[in-house]
Amino acid sequence: MLYRALADLVLVVHLGFIVFAVAGGLLALKWRWVPCVHLPAVAWGLYVELSGSVCPLTPLENSFRRAAGESGYSGGFLEHYAVPIIYPPGLTPTLQFVLAGVLALANVIAYGLVIRRRMHERQR
């Protein structure tokens, strides 16, 4: 039971990291310190997607699942809803490049908004 809970926690953290990497730039509209944390997260996400690497959270989660006696992602809310987002079926190198493009574009837009707002504030 403990290992299953740890595996689910890693899955939630992984999902949270992905959401933060994609949309966290918008938090910079409110807090000036966010880019210091967010831009390294974006860089890591781009590296993982473009290099075909595996995020270290994936083997960690899988080791917890094996320790819990599980072999896959059967059953449960987290497995049913979060796993397909983090581990989409049919993930190919081409799809990884597309995902990297989405990540980059989302952040270019977010930081474009941040820069625009900051410039507007300075003109006041």
Image (cartoon, rainbow, N blue to C red):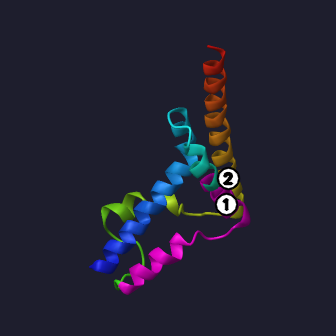
**Mainly helix, strand or loop, the magenta region?**
helix
Looking at the rendering, the stretch of residues picked out in magenta corresponds to 41-67
> Residue 78 vs residue 63: left or right?
left
Q: Is residue 71 visible?
A: no
Q: Residue under label 2, please give it.
A: 100
Q: Quadrant of the C terminus?
A: top right
Between 121 and 27, the one lying in front of the other is 121
Instruction: Name the residue type under label 1.
Output: Glu
Name the image quarter holding residue 97. Answer: bottom right
**Could you tell me which secondary element the residue under label 2 belongs to?**
helix
- The x, y position of residue 17, in whole percent, is 51, 56
Nearer-N-terminus badge (1/2): 1
Amino acid at pointer 2: Ala
Locate residue 1, reporting x and y percent. 26, 79
In the shown orientation, is residue 90 left or right of residue 73?
right
Image coordinates for residue 67, horizontal then vertical, percent? 38, 86
- Do residues under tags 1 and 2 come within 8 Å of each other at their CB atoms? yes
Q: Which mark is residue 28?
A: none
**Residue at 61% across / 36% down in the picture?**
110
Give residue 65's position: percent from left, percent from top.
Answer: 40, 79
Q: Is residue 110 above or below residue 46?
A: above
Residue carrying label 1? 49
Mark 1 secondary-structure assignment: helix
